[in-house]
Image (tube, rainbow, N blue to C red):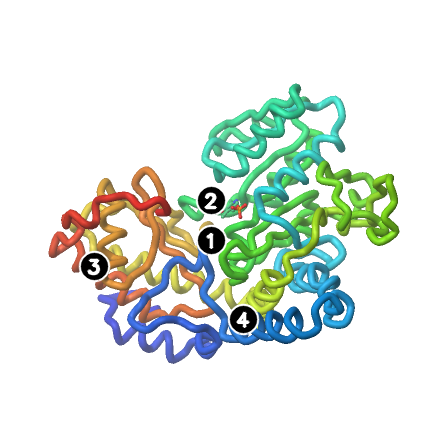
């Protein structure tokens, strides 16, 4: 990006022409006329997924029926997808399970983590953590009776790591601001205090490289439908460091996590390693779609994706400051690209209506309460000219006061 002078659309075009990942966009089915800045909430549809799901439905389910569990490898699908996710998060394939939702995996690993720290009854998290993580911790606390969820502001986490803390529960990339936590440093601080660290990688996996192994992380969960492009409600993943494999107990001890499900034993005996984190029968159609989604990330390479993502968000921030200075936006994300994930968030008192007006113009971002406009930059399929066009639309929405139209005021169920 040119460091001086006014940026023009031609600058963005030049960045697209020089982009080594530009061709990957062709692997996705994206509607015309849309600038899609919500791949952090629901990744776009890979072309291959549409074909593959059709094949699994018609040939494997329709024709081969129940034989497919063996003949078409359905039973191996969770482990196969886990093997694709593992390198993106610095894990070994045998440390990752693909199952259930992120919320359910938080429940399993938080309960498991508490049992690994007997005598300690506090789960420490931050007030700004993603609500489902906090809600699940609250539910577990009610279930167990003697567990306290302690919430502190971001800056007080280290000081709050007392000798009663069993698990530090944090989201790596903040869902509102995109700010990145120091995963290595906070994991070390948790260990120094005798606690375990459980990381939620929902906004990291597929966009920000994570080195769980190098950071000696204990436990982690993450989402399949955001940057991993697995489709709406895709299965999630769970990571357990190998050193905890024999000791970790899951409270959802279902038959698919049994050492030998088809022995139909009366007594539960956990499978070795992370396989015990499977609970019920794997959702084959969703896993087939997730496999295609994760493959798009794996083929591109996470390091190159991160470089492009930082360049995209940097361009967007510079353009907002150049084009929209007059309209009262404040940058809610860290200014330095290294400190934020693959999103840029702006604050504005009329954030909801502005986001609706942008969507009406084909620029799809989202609103997060109370005053955040959130723009996700999935580097697999976004262009630098998309950043330009989005800011040009934002400027017009503000100049023409399009956000004041009555149809942009009513809140939908999903924002
Ligand atoms: C999106 C997201 C989730 C989603 O959880 P689900 O169980 O899939 O609904 C969880 N945690 C964080 C931090 C998220 O951003």
- The residue tagged with tag 4: helix, strand or loop? helix
Residue contact at pointers 2 and 1, CB within 8 angstroms: yes
**Left or right of residue 278: residue 332:** left
Which residue is located at x 56 percent, y 49 percent?
Answer: 201
- 10 Å neighbourhood of mark 1: few (<14), some, or many (≥20)? many
Residue 218's x, y, as percent? 70, 43
Above or below, 188 relative to 281: above
Which callout, 3 or 1, points at the residue further toward the start of the chain?
3
The residue pinned by badge 2 equals 174
**Left or right of residue 411: residue 95:** right
Which quarter of the picture shows residue 82?
bottom right
- Measure the alpha-carbon separation of dots 4 and 2: 29 Å
Number of the front mark, 4 or 2: 4
The residue pinned by badge 3 equals 323
Check the image and name the residue furthest to the top: 146
The residue pinned by badge 4 equals 49
Residue 368's x, y, as percent? 36, 44
The residue pinned by badge 1 equals 341
């Amino acid at each position: 990006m040119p460091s001086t002078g006014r940026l023009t659309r031609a600058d963005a075009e030049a960045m697209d022409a020089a982009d080594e990942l530009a061709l990957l966009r062709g692997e996705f089915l994206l509607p015309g006329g849309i600038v899609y800045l919500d791949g952090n909430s629901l990744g776009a549809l890979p072309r291959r997924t549409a074909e593959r799901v059709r094949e699994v439905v018609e040939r494997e389910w329709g024709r081969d029926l129940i034989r497919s569990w063996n003949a078409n490898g359905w039973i191996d699908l969770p482990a196969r997808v886990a093997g694709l996710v593992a390198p993106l998060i610095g894990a070994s394939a045998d440390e990752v399970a693909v199952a259930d939702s992120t919320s359910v995996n938080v429940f399993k690993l938080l309960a498991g983590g508490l049992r690994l720290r007997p005598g300690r009854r506090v789960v420490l998290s931050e007030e700004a953590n993603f609500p489902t993580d906090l809600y699940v911790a609250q539910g577990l606390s009610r279930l167990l009776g003697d567990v306290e969820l302690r919430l502190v502001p971001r800056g007080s986490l280290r000081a709050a790591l007392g000798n009663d803390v069993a698990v530090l529960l944090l989201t790596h990339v903040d869902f509102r601001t995109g700010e990145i936590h120091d995963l290595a440093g906070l994991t070390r601080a948790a260990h120094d205090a005798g606690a375990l660290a459980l990381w939620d990688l929902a906004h990291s996996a597929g966009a920000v490289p994570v080195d769980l192994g190098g950071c000696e992380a204990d436990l982690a969960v993450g989402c399949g439908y955001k940057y991993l492009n697995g489709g709406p409600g895709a299965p999630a993943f769970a990571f357990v460091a190998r050193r905890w494999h024999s000791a970790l107990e899951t409270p959802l001890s279902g038959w698919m996590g049994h050492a030998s499900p088809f022995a139909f034993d009366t007594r539960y005996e956990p499978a070795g390693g992370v396989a015990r984190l499977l609970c019920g029968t794997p959702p084959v159609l969703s896993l087939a779609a997730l496999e295609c989604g994760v493959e798009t990330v794996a083929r591109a390479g996470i390091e190159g994706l991160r470089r492009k993502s930082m360049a995209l968000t940097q361009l967007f921030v510079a353009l907002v400051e150049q084009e929209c200075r007059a309209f009262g936006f404040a940058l809610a994300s860290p200014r330095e690209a290294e400190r934020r994930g693959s999103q840029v968030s702006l604050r504005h008192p009329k954030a909801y209506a502005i986001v609706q007006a942008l969507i009406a113009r084909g620029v799809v971002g989202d609103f997060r309460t109370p005053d955040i406009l959130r723009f996700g930059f999935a580097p697999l399929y976004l262009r630098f000219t998309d950043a330009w066009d989005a800011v040009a639309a934002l400027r017009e929405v503000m100049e023409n006061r399009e956000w004041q139209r009555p149809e942009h005021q009513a809140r939908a169920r999903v924002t």
